[in-house]
Image (tube, rainbow, N blue to C red):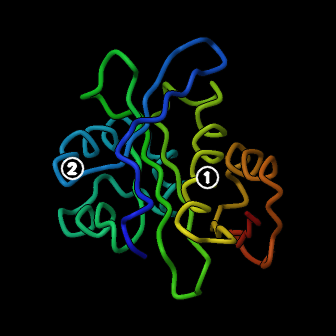
Amino acid sequence: MPDAGRRDAACSITLTDGAATRTREAALVDLSPVQELHRRCSLGSRALRYNAGKSQLSPAEWHQLSNPERGTTLVTTPAERTDHIIAMTNVMRTDQQGVGELAILVEDAWQARGLGTALAEHAAAVARREGHHMLAATVAVTNKPMLHVLQKLDATAVDTTGPVLDLRIPL
């Protein structure tokens, strides 16, 4: 997909408690603050995001996630601390034309404040802008907060067997 539709501007998100955040496209130089985000997240949060207790991303993994040819990775910071990443959202291309893959990691201290919902909604807008008509997400059945977020986006399960659900979100 060409980069013509990509935007460099940050998106401001105000949380349910009034906290202000900024979400922008990630860059290669964000690897260190993304690693710090992973260290601040609990093993449980990382396990729900990756279906494993992944403690950090390798430079090669970050290169893939931050490569615009592979999709869009967004990073979120508090509005007043733009060097402190508190969330990472991925809208990656898949081998299915028009279907993007959604994943979100929110630092524990920033959870249950409306950030995950706002990031999912923003990711849907990014996916539409990039020409996707559907988002896919693989979510553990125990990840009730993410399942709740995706229900708000009208997600439906296409595979309900086993410990993870394969969900589809129409755009």
Q: Secondary structure at mark 1?
A: helix
Q: Pointer 1 and pointer 2: residues touching (CB < 8 Å)?
A: no
Horizontal arrangement in the rendering, residue 117 relative to residue 54 (left or right): right
Residue in the picture at 51% in, 45% down:
45
Judge depth for marks 1 and 2 and give the one in front: 1
**Residue 19 against residue 95 in the figure, above or below:** above
Task: In this rendered view, identify the residue nearer to me: 110 or 27.
Answer: 27
* x then y, percent, for residue 73: 40, 55
* x then y, percent, for residue 21: 46, 24
Work out how far the residue at label 1 is from the one at label 2, CA to CA, in angstroms: 24 Å
Residue in the picture at 69% in, 71% down:
134
**Residue 123 against residue 5 in the figure, above or below:** above
Can you name the residue that lies furthest to the top here?
A: 18
Q: Neighbour class for label 2 at 10 Å: few (<14), some, many (≥20)? A: some
Residue in the picture at 63% in, 66% down:
137
Q: Amino acid at mark 2?
A: Leu
Horizontal arrangement in the rendering, residue 85 relative to residue 97 (left or right): left
Task: In this rendered view, identify the residue nearer to me: 169 or 171.
Answer: 171
Residue in the picture at 26% in, 61% down:
62
* x then y, percent, for residue 56: 28, 54
Which numbered dot is residue 31?
Answer: 2
* x then y, percent, for residue 55: 32, 52
Can you name the residue that lies furthest to the front here?
A: 4
Q: Neighbour class for label 1 at 10 Å: few (<14), some, many (≥20)? A: few
Q: Which residue is mark 1?
A: 125
Count of all numbered marks drawn on residues in the image: 2
Q: Amino acid at mark 1?
A: Ala
Q: Quadrant of residue 8?
A: top left
**Which of the two labelled residues, at mark 1 and mark 2, occupies the earlier sequence position?**
2
Q: Quadrant of residue 162?
A: bottom right
Q: Quadrant of the C terminus?
A: bottom right
Q: Quadrant of the N terminus?
A: bottom left
